[in-house]
Structures are given as structure tokens and as C-alpha cells.
Amino acid sequence: MAIGNTMRDFGNLPMGCALTPGDTIPQPIRGGKEYTDSQNNITTNIAISPEDGWKPTFSATVTANAAYATPTDLLVLPGSATAGKVVKLVRFDIASVATAAGIYTVHLIKRTTGNTGGTSAAMTITKLDSNDTATAAPVTYSVVPTTLGTGTDITAVRLFQNTLTLQPERLSFLFGNGPMEALTLRGVAQAFAVNFNAVALPAGSLFDMTIYWTEE
């Protein structure tokens, strides 16, 4: 049958329809190739194509960040202080070099209470869409927090640290990829933290780190 004559529900909307941004008229969803099963039931797959993300998305990065001695939390992304705003971490990248090559463990932690004390500096935030407004405020620490908030490891991995003149190993962590939930931060007390468990890092340790998050 023609699209204009497609089956409709009691509200006169096409069965299996969707709204297109900027269009107030629901449109039927397009199917793929038909398939007939052993019982002569005819079905079709819904045609799906990738689309640019619609959530406000932000990134913040530091390069050649010199860690303070025996660091605990080095980078922290807290949740939003704006009521009703939810922050979701979707990606974290890290790479490191030092005077001499080495290997150590980096802990990625979700905190449910905030840190106190220490000295931190705000990270520069990039809006992937200039019309969006970020409410989360990520920081890097230069002096160890006096008290760390309550938290548990999301993961802990060994990071190889190359020498200053060589290409460093780069690790990327994706959250919310597929059916897995993104790391969700509800309220300013919750946070994502990059932690080194107070281990003495090799001399001349420098870090490149980037976080990507959405707000909704």
C-alpha cells in the first residue's frame, strides 16, 4: 500500500512512526528487505543509519601535566551543581612519559562523596557545539587533597611509561558504548577520579589526559 494509506492508530498516527527534528508531522519508519519465515510470516528489519550525537558534549584536556609527589587523585570530573543536570563520562584518554621508562598502575575511580583540601586548577573546557553550556567543572590537582571522597575502582590498569623522546603508550576507555551504561554522575558530590594510590612516580613524569562527557 502507499505510504499515505499506511495503517494508523486511534490517534491517526502512522503505525511505527518517528518525528524528524524541525518537522511536526510524524513520518513512517523505513524498513529493509522483507523476510518470509517457515510459517509464511513476512517481517522486515528497520533501516538504521548512524547519526551525529544529540546530547550536549564537552571535552577537557591537559598536556605535559607534571604530577605532584606520590599523587592520589590527579584529575577529577565532578557532577553538576545545577539541579536536575546529569553528567555522563563517555571517554577518558591517558598517556605518559618520564625521564626513564617505567610501568605503574592507574586507578579510575567513581567517588560518591567529594574530596576536601588540596590545591586544584580548573581545566579548560571545549564545547563540541558552541551553543551548549557546560555545568561540570573538571580540575587537576597540584597538591594532594587533604581527604579523599568515598569511592571504588571502575578499573585499574598498568600503564607503560616511555622515555621523554619516544612515543608514549596511549590508553582509551569508553563508557556507554553499546548496551553498557555511561559513567553517570548525579550531583556535585559524585565524581570521576584518576588516581595513582600515592605511589612514587618515576622522575620527570608528565601526563596527557583528556575527558569527554555529556550533560542532560
Image (cartoon, rainbow, N blue to C red):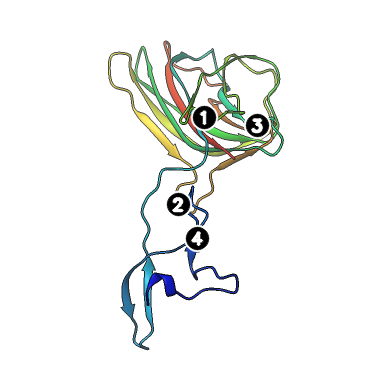
Tell me which amino acid carries mark 4. Pro
- Viewer-nearest residue: 210 or 149: 210
Q: CA distance from mark 1 to mark 4?
A: 27 Å
**Image location of residue 148, percent across then percent down:** 67, 25
Between discs 4 and 3, the one toward the N terminus: 4
**Image location of residue 134, percent across then percent down:** 57, 28
Residues tagged 1 and 3 counted as in contact (Cβ below 8 A): no
Q: Residues within 10 Å of mark 2 (few under 14, many from 20)?
A: few
| Residue at numbered disc 2 | 178
- The disc placed on residue 80 is 3
Tell me which amino acid carries mark 3. Ser
SS assignment at label 1: loop
Q: Say above or below: 37 vs 19.
A: below
Q: Residues within 10 Å of mark 4 (few under 14, many from 20)?
A: some
Q: Say above or below: 82 vs 2.
A: above
- Viewer-nearest residue: 75 or 107: 75
Q: CA distance from mark 2 to mark 1?
A: 27 Å
Foreground label between 1 and 3: 1
Tell me which amino acid carries mark 2. Gly
Between discs 2 and 1, the one toward the N terminus: 1
Identified at 55% across, 17% down, the residue is: 70
Q: Residues within 10 Å of mark 3 (few under 14, many from 20)?
A: many
Foreground label between 1 and 4: 4
| Residue at numbered disc 4 | 26
| Residue at numbered disc 1 | 131
